[in-house]
Image: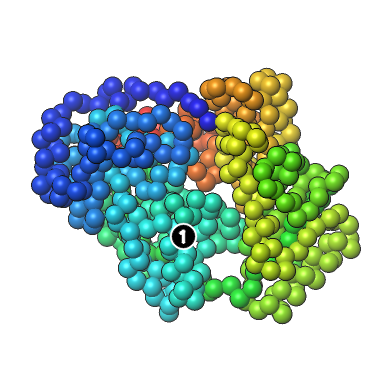
Amino acid sequence: MYVTYNTELEDAVEEVNGDQLLAKLRQALGANAVLSGNDLPERNRTDWSFLPSAAPLAVVRPATTEDVATALKLCHEAGVVVTPQGGLTGLCGGARPLDGGIALSLERMHGIEAIDPVGMTITVRAGTPLEVIQKAADEAGLFFSLDLGARGSCAIGGNLSTNAGGNRVIRYGMARDLVLGLEVVTMDGTVLTMMNRMIKNNAGYDLKQLFLGSEGTLGVITRTVLRLHPKPGCVQAALCVVTGYDQVLALLESARRALGPLLSAFEVMWADYWTLYADHVPGARPPVALGNGSHVVLIEMQGLDEMIDGGRFSAWLEGMFEQGAVVDGAVSRSVADLQAFWKTRDAAAEFANPEVAGPHISFDVGLPVGRMDEFASRSSTALTEALGCRSVYYGHVGDGNLHVVAWVKGAAPQPLPAVSEVVYRIVRELGGTVSAEHGIGTLKKPYLGYSRSPVEIDLMRRLKSCLDPKGLLNPGKVFD
C-alpha cells in the first residue's frame, strides 16, 4: 500500500535546542539509551502502515518505568513531542514518529515478571512480544488467549494501546477484557501504578480503561497484569463449505447453541478470497474445494476433555452435514491439520506477493453480523464500477469484524483516498465502524466521524487536554 502523508504536524513542531535535550536524556538514561544521527535505527522511522519514513530527533530506549517517566518529563519541559513505540506492527500509522520529535521505543522493557497459577494472572513488561507471553503461560500449564498474526513481532503494550482483537474474541473478548492491572506514565512524568490482580475491584473509577485503546495519546503503558485461562485439553477445527450467507448465519447460531463456551473461533472466507488464495498463493494446498460454495467457514473448538468435548464437536458437525447446512468440509485429526486450516485464513499475509495481488490497501471494519454479506457485495460492486478496483473479503464474522483487501492492478501509488471513501461510506450507511481492531492512527483519522458523533469526539479531545495539556504525546493520531 502506498500513501501520501500530510507533513503539517512536522512543520508545526516547535523548534527547540535538540542538542541540549539529547544531552539531558543521555545523562539521565545513559548514552546507549539515546540513538540519534547516523545511529538512528531505520525501523523506528515508521510502522507497518507503509507511511513514509520520518526523521525524528532521536530514538529513546528506556529500560525501566522510571526511565520512561524521566524521558517524558524532560521532553515535556522542553516542549518536544513524543511517539510511543512497541513492536511497530500497527497498520494505521499510530507508531510513526514526527519529524523533529522523539520516538520512545519500549523494546528494552521486556520480560515476564510473575505468573500466579492460583490467581491465574501473568505480570509482564510492555515491550514483551505477544508470543513470549503465550509460551510462558503454556509452560505454566495455562493459556493466554490473545492471538494475532504478528504474534512474534508485536509487543503487548501496543496490543493494549490499540485494544487488539485477533482470532479468539468470540470466546475470550478483546485485549481490554484480558487486563486486570496496568502501569502508565503520563506526559508530565507522572507514574500511575494500577497493578490490580483481582477480577472484582470496584473501588472508584476504573482508570486503566482510559488508556486501553487510546493508542498512546493519553499515556505510555509500561507494565500490565493479564488474565490467564485454563490450558485447553483438546483443540479441534473444521473447514466447512456453504452455499449462501444465510447458511453462514445458521451455522453460527447452531454452533453457539450446541457448543456454548467451547466455540473459540468462527472465521469466514468469501469465495473471492478463497479463489485468490487457492489459485495464486504459491504453495497453497486447500484442504477443501470451494466448488459451487459461496463461503468457507473455519470453526475452532477448545475443550478440556477429548472424549467429551471432542465428541460433542464431532456430533454437532455430523448433524450439520446430515441437515445439508454444510455441503463439503474437512475436520482436523492432528496438530498438522489445525495448522493447515489456519494457514488458509492467514494466507492474506501473502497477498502482497506480485503473483497474488501485489501492492494493495487493507481495511479492518466492524459491521452488524447480519449485514456483512450485504457490505461485501455492495463494496465489491462499487469499487469495481468506480475505480476498476478488485477486492476480497474475510474475517472474524463471529464477532462482527470484516477485513477487506482491495487493489487496482499495476497502480502505483494505490488510490487510497478514493478506495477508502467508497469502503467507509458503505460502512457508515450500514451502521458499522471504520475500525474493529486496528485502531485509528493517522490513516483512519479523516473517517473517525463516520463512526463517532461530534459529542463523543469532543469528549475525547477534552480527555486528551486534561491528561496532556500541551498536546505532546503522540499528537496527530486519532484526531487533530
Is residue 280 visible from the viewing direction of this image?
yes
Nearer-the-camera pick, 146 or 34: 34
Residue closest to the far top: 386
Q: Position of residue 323 (x, y in %)?
A: 89, 60
Residue closest to the far front: 283
Up-down relation of residue 263 to residue 417 (above or below): below
At x 60%, y 37%, the residue is 353
Residue 293 relative to residue 192: left or right? right
Up-down relation of residue 370 to residue 340 (above or below): above
Q: Position of residue 72 (x, y in %)?
A: 21, 44
Q: Position of residue 83 (x, y in %)?
A: 31, 39
Coloring applied to the structure: rainbow
The type of residue carrying mark 1 is Glu
At x 68%, y 48%, the residue is 283
Residue carrying label 1: 131
Kindly state the secondary structure of the residue where label 1 is placed: helix
Q: Residues within 10 Å of mark 1 (few under 14, many from 20)?
A: many
Residue 40 relative to residue 180: left or right? left
Q: Position of residue 238 (x, y in %)?
A: 73, 61
Residue 265 relative to residue 123: left or right? right
Nearer-the-camera pick, 163 or 111: 111
Q: Quadrant of residue 52?
A: top left
Up-down relation of residue 282 to residue 11 (above or below): below
